[in-house]
Image (spheres, rainbow, N blue to C red):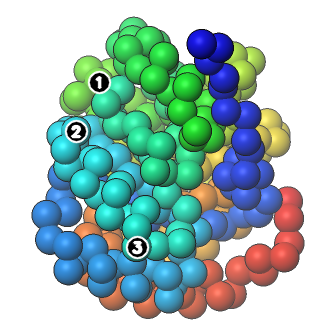
Amino acid sequence: MLLQLNESKHILDAISSRKGQVAVLIDPDKCKDERALVELLDKASFAGVDYLFVGGSTVAQNDFHRVIDFLNANTEIPIVIFPGASHQISEKADALLYLSLISGRNPDFLIGHHVQSASQVFDMNLEVIPTGYILIDGGTHSSVAYVSQTTPIPSDRHSIILNTAKAGLLQGKQIIYLDAGSGAKHSIPTDVINALNELSHPIIVGGGIRSIEQMEALKRAGANIVVIGNRIEENMDFLLDIQAFTSSSDKSVSH
Ligand code: 1GP
């Protein structure tokens, strides 16, 4: 049988189309309660959230599939996999951020997990988005740094961050994802995003984003997507504030 790589680009085009989009990160590890998920979906859809990112550093396969299946059946918001490992793939999502942890030097997270799942992913009806994943020091020892056994780049080393992003793009990555790690004390500084703007590729930013002011600043600096995890896990009503943020964004303007 001839394997066929899926070449659709709907989600990549949507991500590229404008700055200041919002993704809510759903960690299936923490979603045991279906009623809470229903409430989250209601509020996320009211808030005009653009994407649901699903994944995590320590997620069990059955929890991953349970949550993806539930989202697939219950929301129109695009589901994008943000995988922590090779078992976090499903055709029921709209896209897969095909992450390589290019700030690290752990071969498992540069190519190892990819080889394990390549045959399955290659044959899936799933948009695959090559993504250069750069871990930046956010002032805490993050789960992803621990699990990947890699060292984040200090946030003031702009030339290392820029050269890492450039190397990723030269390897064919379509997006750069800057992550300060879940629960970071300091989110990605806006001057890091400014330093990458010359690359003219979409930028996703996450880790430690807890206020609308931070979201506004990251959007102004040029982030295409800001990702919020913990802040919403702690209090879903933050989505009501996000509604004001998304409705003030001019969705017709492309950059
Ligand atoms: C996704 O790691 C982030 O990139 C999520 O971080 O949970 O701190 O929002 P928070």
Q: Quadrant of the C terminus?
A: bottom right
Q: Amino acid at mark 1?
A: Ser
Front disc: 3 or 2: 3
> Does residue 251 sit above or below 203 in this rendering?
below
Camera-nearest residue between 25 and 28: 28
Disc 1 secondary structure class: helix
Q: Amino acid at mark 3?
A: Asn
Task: Name the residue carrying label 1.
Answer: 148
Label ID, residue 61: 2
> Does residue 134 sit above or below 186 in this rendering?
above
Return the disc, 1 or 2, that comes first in the chain's sequence: 2
Return the disc, 3 or 2, that comes first in the chain's sequence: 2
Tell me the residue at 33%/87% (across/down).
237
Q: Position of residue 100 (x, y in %)?
A: 50, 25
Task: Name the residue carrying label 3.
Answer: 74
Disc 2 secondary structure class: helix
Taking the image as shown, residue 191 lies to the left or right of residue 212, namely: right
Q: Position of residue 62 (x, y in %)?
A: 19, 44
Front disc: 1 or 2: 2
Return the disc, 3 or 1, that comes first in the chain's sequence: 3
Tell me the residue at 60%/73% (across/down).
216
Q: Position of residue 15 (x, y in %)?
A: 69, 55
3D distance between C-alphas at marks 1 and 2: 18 Å
Tell me the residue at 18%/59% (across/down).
30
Taking the image as shown, residue 238 lies to the left or right of residue 66, namely: right
Front disc: 3 or 1: 3
Q: Amino acid at mark 2?
A: Gln
